[in-house]
Amino acid sequence: MVLDNQKLCIQAAIKTAAGADRNAVKLIRIRDTLHITEIEISEALLEEARSNPQIEIVEGPYALPFDEEGNLF
């Protein structure tokens, strides 16, 4: 499957995830596999992250930053 932008790719991944609760999507975004000291997580994972003493929450929830073409920046 080829889609026009990253926003459509994320939406398609969520829509096609069999058995997933679309109202509590668990997503993790990493910069790349060489830089995983900081990650972004969806709100559905926030409480789990807060309960882990090895994880520091550095920022609260926010909308993913898509540009006008639908790609993350």
Image (cartoon, grey):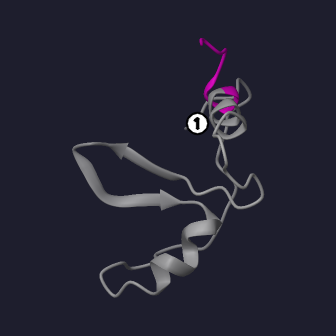
In the rendered image, the residue lying farthest to the front is 19
Residue 12 percent location from the top left of the image: 68, 30
In the rendered image, the residue lying farthest to the top is 2
Residue 43 vs residue 71, the one in the foreground? 43
How many neighbours does mark 1 have within 10 angstroms: few (below 14), some (14-19), or many (20 or more)?
Answer: few
Secondary structure state at the residue bearing disc 1: loop
Please report the bounds of the magenta region as a residue range.
1-8
Q: Would residue 73 appear left or right of 53 to someone viewing this image?
A: right
The residue depicted at 70 percent of the width and 61 percent of the height is 24
- Compared to 59, does 64 lie above or below? above
User: The N terminus is located in which quarter?
Assistant: top right
The residue depicted at 53 percent of the width and 73 percent of the height is 59
- Compared to 14, does 28 lie above or below? below
Residue 7 painted magenta: yes
Residue type at tag 1? Leu
Q: Would residue 27 appear left or right of 25 to someone viewing this image?
A: left
Residue 69 vs residue 20, the one in the foreground? 20
Residue 17 painted magenta: no
Q: Would residue 6 appear left or right of 30 to someone viewing this image?
A: right
Res 60 → quadrant: bottom right
